[in-house]
Amino acid sequence: MKTAVIVFPGSNCDRDIAVALEAVTGRKPAMVWHRDSELPDGTGLVALPGGFSYGDYLRSGAMAARSPIMRAVSDAAAKGMPVLGVCNGFQVLTEAGLLPGALMRNAGLNFVCRDVALTVENAQSAFTSRYAAGERIMIPVAHHDGNYFADSDTLDRLEGEGRVAFRYAEDVNGSARSIAGVLNDAGNVLGMMPHPERRIEPAHGGDEGRRLFEGLLELVA
Amino acid sequence: MKLRIHVTLKPGVLDPQGKAIEHALAGLGFSGINGARVGRLIELDVADSTDDSAIDAMCRQLLANTVIENYRIEHLEPAK
């Protein structure tokens, strides 16, 4: 499968996620600059990496969400292409309107950088099929603006439709209903604050993140 | 034409920074602090011919995130 990683000025997990994608697909992803207006032909999956695109100017992800490549990503997402946004990538997806809600400053105001326990809420999605519903996994977080907010109607809808992919199993950042990752209504766009690409081999302390990428491979193969 | 765009958090959206300010003011000995909320002020200088609908679109598309924020447009000089 051909994959693509979007690189914004200030992305800093683009190479990490590229390593994770290459580990499961066997081929290097295309690194696509944010000024490009098209994805490479045959792209089967797009990843928006973590980092501090545009230095978090205005709001985290706000500037990146309006960059030229995001029109192509939105069009591809509308046609069903899987899109994974991690950390800053999640912020970009909400700012671009591809996912509901917003990510605000952590409730404790601190940058949180540690391994956290997550509960897999939905194991049916393309991204989570290699996990068991209710499974507890450890995945690192590293963010200042990870406090998920949406109005209560939206939160009810997300929960009712099984669109909460992951929930924090401990207090991390004040997120509404402890939401760590959400899916779009079609299930092909996932945004999550924790970094699965930082836990893909035992040397990382565990490899629970690897299954997320393996599940995607199965989907698009 | 000069404008000020006031971007504020919607009522009901928790504001941890505002809470911290509230507590810091109390810590300095100021009493009667009933609340503090942090917003953003954007000063814009645009062509006089810019119409209100374009300014509104700028706010909705970029300057404010309407999921969590409200905005108010203030004209510093009367529009011609």
Image: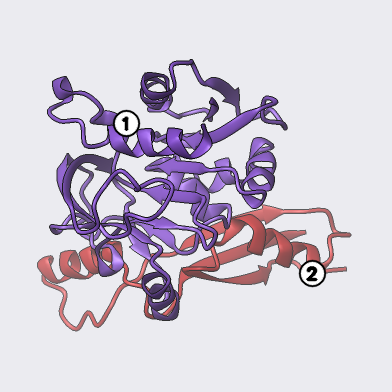
Chain colours: A purple, B red
Q: How many marks?
A: 2
Which residue is drawn at the image coordinates 14% and 59% (left, top)? A171
Residue A180 lies left or right of residue A216; in this view the side is left
Residue A211 image-quadrant placement: top left
Q: Is residue A58 visible?
A: no
Give the camera-side residue of B42 and A102.
A102
Residue B2 image-quadrant placement: bottom right
| Helix, strand or loop status at disc 1 | helix
Against B65, residue A198 (above or below) is above
Which residue is drawn at the image coordinates 29% and 47% (left, top)? A144
Task: Give amino acid for label 2.
Answer: Asp
- Image coords of residue B15 (percent x, y): 32, 68
Against A71, residue B7 (above or below) is below
For discs 2 and 1, the disc positioned in front in the rendered view: 1
Which residue is drawn at the image coordinates 77% and 53% (left, top)? B46
Q: Is residue A70 visible?
A: yes
Task: Please state the chain letter of the residue tagged with numbered disc 2 in the rendered image.
Answer: B
Residue A124 lies left or right of residue A61; in this view the side is left
Looking at the picture, do discs 2 and 1 lie on one chain?
no
Give the camera-side residue of A9 and A208.
A208
Which residue is drawn at the image coordinates 15% and 23% (left, top)? A202
Give the camera-side residue of A102 and A191.
A191
The residues tagged by marks 2 and 1 sit, at their Cα atoms, a distance apart of 45 Å
Against A23, residue A157 (above or below) is below
- Image coords of residue B37 (percent x, y): 35, 71
- Image coords of residue B34 (percent x, y): 24, 83
Residue A64 lies left or right of residue A24; in this view the side is right
Tags 2 and 1 in contact by the CB under 8 Å rule? no
Residue at label 1? A197
Q: What number is the disc on residue B52?
A: 2
Estimate how packed mark 1 is, as few (under 14), some (14 to 19) or many (20 or more) residues with alpha carbons within 10 Å. many
Judged from this view, the residue extending furthest toward the top is A27
